[in-house]
């Protein structure tokens, strides 16, 4: 979740599969999200990176939209199709708040707006490119809240600069105050190079961190010791350096 003033957005909040590696949402946090109680009150938008079980649960996101009528959803078409499969005709109204993103690999990034949000999206292949998971529509979201704070959520992006180089001007034109790359960007030379020379956020916090990686940097695999990672549900960071 990212908060700026009265504006709140959440990325990949509901999923049901940790595949034996990833933290699932704690029960109390899940209940607060559905109930819309603090800190999850007044969420404006939810963003989905891709239709994989450790990022997205179609039935749960549908339920969230039904019980929280103020939330707008932005998701790849593949994920929206997954929601339509579990939705009934009585759920049609919900889809008025759903924006399906149709982006193929190498398509130019797209830009949208809603109140308080500038939303930019580009398709970046899932890790495993170019041999596996090519069918998965993985979206990297760059979202600016109240023209003040810009964040970048990358989903399961593949750490190869060939995906980023073609949109060099796009990455330069709206610099991120904080990026949330999957942790493997830190443990691969290609990923580090993309962060340092292409995306250039003020600060990175690695996400999608396996539960086997300790919170204490000294106990981590050596290549992850020098990086900031989210390892525990509910921990937070202050986004500083937000400029006008
Ligand atoms: Zn994935």
Image (cartoon, rainbow, N blue to C red):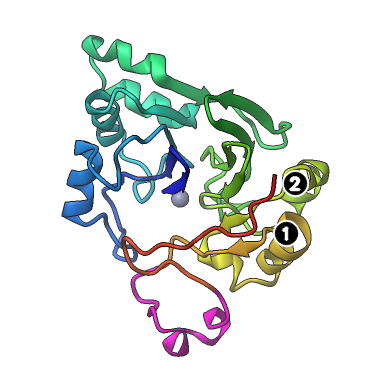
Q: Is residue 98 above or below residue 199?
A: above
Give the side of residue 244 with respect to residue 36, left or right. right
Disc 1 residue: CB within 8 Å of ligand 1: no
Task: Specify which label sits upstream in the sequence, 2 or 1.
Answer: 2
Residue at image point 71% right, 31% down: 107
Residue at image point 26% right, 20% down: 87
Mark 1 crowdedness (10 Å alpha carbons): few <14, some 14-19, many ≥20: some
Task: Classify mark 1: helix, strand or loop.
Answer: loop
Residue of label 1: 200
Give how far across and how far down residue 100 sits, in percent: 49, 24
Give the side of residue 37 with respect to residue 235, left or right. left
Residue 96's disc number:
none
Given residues 7 and 132, the one toward you in this image is: 7
Q: Quadrant of residue 145?
A: top right
Residue 51 is one of the magenta-drawn residues? no
Residue of label 2: 171
**Dominant SS type (magenta):** loop
Give how far across and how far down residue 220 sits, in percent: 45, 84
Q: Is residue 100 above or below residue 238?
A: above
Q: Residue furthest bottom?
A: 218
Residue at image point 69% right, 72% down: 189
Given residues 242 and 179, the one toward you in this image is: 242
Given residues 100 and 236, the one toward you in this image is: 236
Find out whether the residues at labels 2 and 1 contact each other: C-beta distance under 8 Å. Answer: yes
Mark 2 crowdedness (10 Å alpha carbons): few <14, some 14-19, many ≥20: some
Give how far across and how far down residue 118 sits, in percent: 61, 32
Quarter of the image that includes the C terminus: top right
Report the Cα–Cα distance between label 2 and label 1. Answer: 8 Å
Q: For the magenta stretch, what is the residue range? A: 210-227
Give the side of residue 100 with respect to residue 14, left or right. right
Task: Classify mark 2: helix, strand or loop.
Answer: helix
Give how far across and how far down residue 173 sits, in percent: 78, 42
């Amino acid at each position: 979740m990212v908060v700026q003033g009265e504006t709140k957005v959440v990325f990949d909040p509901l999923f049901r599969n940790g595949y034996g590696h990833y933290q699932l949402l704690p029960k109390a946090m899940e209940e607060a999200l559905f109930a819309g109680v603090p800190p999850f009150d007044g969420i404006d938008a939810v963003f989905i990176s891709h239709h994989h079980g450790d990022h997205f649960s179609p039935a749960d996101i549908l339920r969230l939209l039904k019980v929280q009528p103020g939330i707008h959803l932005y998701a790849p078409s593949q994920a929206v199709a997954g929601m339509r499969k579990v939705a009934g005709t009585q759920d049609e109204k919900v889809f008025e708040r759903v924006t399906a993103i149709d982006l193929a690999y190498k398509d130019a990034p797209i830009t949208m707006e809603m109140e308080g949000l500038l939303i930019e999206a580009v398709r970046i292949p899932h890790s495993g490119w170019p041999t596996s998971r090519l069918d998965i529509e993985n979206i990297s979201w760059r979202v600016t809240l109240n023209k003040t704070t810009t964040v970048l959520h990358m989903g399961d992006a593949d750490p190869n600069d060939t995906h980023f180089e073609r949109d060099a001007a796009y990455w330069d034109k709206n610099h991120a105050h904080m990026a949330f790359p999957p942790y493997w960007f830190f443990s691969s030379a290609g990923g580090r190079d993309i962060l340092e020379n292409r995306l250039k956020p003020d600060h990175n916090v690695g996400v999608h961190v396996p539960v086997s990686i300790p919170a204490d940097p000294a106990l981590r695999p050596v290549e992850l010791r020098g990086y900031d990672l989210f390892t525990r549900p509910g921990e937070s960071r202050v986004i500083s350096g937000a400029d006008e």
